[in-house]
Image: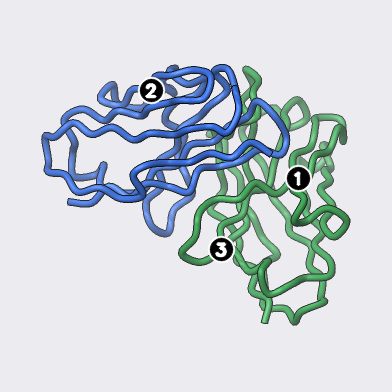
Amino acid sequence: EAQLVESGGDLVQPGGSLRLSCAAAGFSFGATYMAWVRQAPGKGLEWVANLGPGGGPTYYADSVKGRFTISRDNAKSSLYLQVNSLRVEDTAVYYCARDPPRGGAYFDLWGQGTLVTVS
Amino acid sequence: AVQLTQSPSSLSASVGDTVSISCRASQDIGGALAWYQQTPGKPPNLLIYDASNLEGGVPSRFSGSGSGTDFTLTISSLQPEDFTTYYCEQFANYPLTFGGGTKVEI
């Protein structure tokens, strides 16, 4: 069964950094576009970043460009999000999500999320 | 960036009702729209992709329609588990964007 499991969320002070991880299993990770999507407490969904199968291309939301970096290790079936210069408004549950193998930048598989609190 | 406006932001209905949720794009996105359902404390679940294609395993009471700038999610014969929040997403252009959500309440 395909699954995604995030980790790395924590309580961090403004200006701090974290590295979020997403472990994938049950599908051809190395052939799939992957993404991070976040959701602030009680708010809607916000796309953060996308990454192609071979490590590129990368796409970022303007709100995180220059502060966040998406990357992957296909040998470990893992996706990462390095989050730097954190702001209070970055507080959210961060979801790892998969673009469908058939193509299209929407998300057919989601992890349970990891909470980042900036305070 | 393409802005998506969902309406209404909330609606009240009863089990067995049919409801429709609108998603309007600020520019033509063709058919590049998806719909998700999200229950509290859970990740979103894909319902519809390419505006009108039902994702595998999703009940047939869910349907999507529209193209260009105007899209609709219709839920026929509401079931108790359908009373939750729904989001649209456009994937025609980066940055990807989501609508603000529609909460369906009993």
Left or right position of A23 against B39: right
Residue A78: give its label: 1
The lab-note entry on whether marks 3 and 1 share a chain reads yes
**Are the two marked residues, 2 and 1, in contact with CB atoms closer than 8 angstroms?**
no
> Label 1 sits on what residue type?
Ser
The residue where tag 2 is placed is B64
Q: Is residue B85 above or below residue B4?
A: below
Query: Which one is nearer the viewer's eye here, B58 or B70?
Result: B70
Identify the secondary structure beneath mark 2: strand
Query: Which one is nearer the viewer's eye here, A67 or A18?
Result: A67
Q: Is residue A83 above or below residue B2?
A: below
Give the mark nearest the N terminus, 3 or 1.
3
Q: Circle 2 marks a residue in which chain?
A: B
Horizontal and vertical percent for residue A59? 80, 39
At label 1, counting other C-alpha atoms closer than 10 Å, the crowd grade (few under 14, some 14-19, many 20 or more) is: many
Task: Please report the residue visible at 70 percent of the width from the left and 49 percent of the height from the top.
Answer: A48
The lab-note entry on whether marks 2 and 1 share a chain reads no
Query: Which one is nearer the viewer's eye here, B32 or A20?
Result: B32
Q: Is residue A56 above or below residue A36?
A: above
Q: CA distance from mark 3 to mark 2?
A: 27 Å
**Dividing the image into 4 quarters, which one contains the N terminus of chain B?**
top right
Q: Colour of chain B?
A: blue
Which of the 4 image quadrants contains residue A20? Answer: bottom right
